[in-house]
Amino acid sequence: MPSQPEILIVDGLMKKKLRGLKDLVFDAVEVTTNLVQKTHDDVAAKTLRYAKIVEPVAEPAEVVHDVQKMTAAGVYTTIRTVNRGIGQIADAGYSVASNVAGQIEPKTDTELSTPLRSDSAGSFAWLLDSAEGVLNGFIGDFLESRNNALDLGMSFRHDGRVLELTEEALAEAIAEPKKKLCVFVHGLSCTEWSWSLFAEQYYGDPSVTFGTKLEEDLGFTPMYVRYNSGRHISENGKHLSRLLSELLRVYPDSVEEIVLIGHSMGGLVSRSAAHYGSEHDEPWAKKLRHVVSLASPHLGAPLEKATNALTSLLSVFDTAGTKVPAAVLNARSAGIKDLRFGYIVDHEWQDKNPDALLEDNRQDIPFADNVGYYFIAGTVHRDPNHPASQLVGDLLVRLPSAAGHHPEHARRIPFHFGRVFPKMHHFHFVNHPDVYDQVRMLVSSSPFELKQLGEKQPDAEPEE
């Protein structure tokens, strides 16, 4: 008797992701139809614009334009109606398939999860998680607005699964809870898997992360965050602050110290969470001791600034060949646009035009009291003082931005300590042994000691 074929799509989470993917496809058809219709209308209006002011063809031109608009509207409305109808049919078919599949015994949570390790890159679960992280980075705000199941939201993760903030779930996931917590916040379009990059190359063990090493060396319990990096950074900061307060409420032991460690965008989200936690007098903020930013664009990212300049230039020309690419590029997420100047609070972007040409609304956001703030940055050139180092930094983040201070600008972010590593690119900072040694030194010191050190070396001289 032939064995029953293995069915992978029986897990509730997998079903949710597939439904989200289906919704995204049909949403994309609708959004694309709207863009094509607008472009069609603009081209037609431009073509007939001059005819309408020339007698005796003005009146016929107006009639032609009205007929064209009615015909086009009917065609595009039909496309949207058919698309929605097919979507509803797909929903019905999906429900039937889910019910049938649900009769088959599902895999266990342990079998369906992928351990936090870099050698699992070939697994379907790892690839799916990575693709979902990329998708959230580029259009995460759109996914959230459509209530799409692919929206990652924000949660703590353990072995690739959502870690529910209940006493029972934490007791099961954390064998020996420590009184010190280090919270890891990944960058744009990533997931918590990024903290295990290059682990086998660096340590000979694919499961080693900064978290596992801090747990072994300094007695921290590591907590990994996964979030929708396409949302506004300030929204994710507020969400992280709320999650940390909830974590403290159900944590198996009393917490004495919290450290936030963020890579790239994660450094900005960490600063935002610290700000809102302090501002709202959240319980967890009283335990916060250190905020460590690894290769974070505190003064903005050059690639986003270049994209903003390009879309502004394309929008100047009144042609479909320029306006359509501009509209597509401007559909990038709010999180990416926040990276243009490093926005971390709501009032930096609220009631502002997100596509205005290089309009800098960044504010001076004070640090939380009694907390040490540090940056760690890098340059691909061996000499951090070389002009190329200042220009390209670690390839994605320029050195002045990572350090929070540009020589030509009066505004600066007054980090208490900073260090620059030469010959390192952007993703070295998630798991490099030299970076870990620096992180360990920072979080094992008192904020007061590091503030004094920062006062002696205010410009955080680069390492040779």
Image: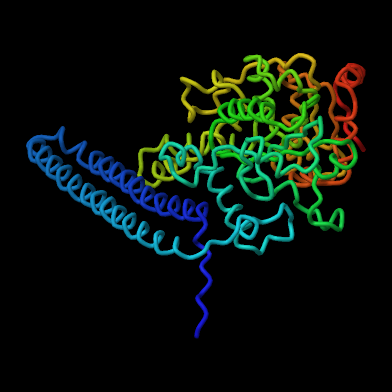
Q: Above or below — where is 107 with respect to 276?
A: below
> x%, y% of residue 438?
88, 36
Residue under the image location 74 percent in, 44 percent down: 426
Instruction: Kindly give the residue lying farthest to the bottom in the view shown.
Output: 1
The answer to which quarter of the image holds residue 405 is top right
Question: Where residue 320 sits in the image (x, y, percent)?
Answer: 35, 45
Quarter in which the C terminus is drawn: top right
> Residue 329, percent across and down?
48, 42
Drawn side of residue 181 relative to residue 33, left or right: right
Q: Residue furthest front?
A: 168
Image position, residue 100 (x, y; %): 40, 64
**85 or 386: nearer the viewer:** 85
Q: Is residue 424 above or below residue 256?
A: below
Looking at the image, can residue 290 be seen? Answer: no
- Do we see residue 188 in this rendering? yes
Q: How is the image coloured?
A: rainbow
Count of numbered tags = 0
Q: Nearer the viewer, residue 16 or 329?
A: 16
On the image, which quarter does residue 439 sit in? top right
Q: Residue at x 82, y 36 (%)?
A: 220
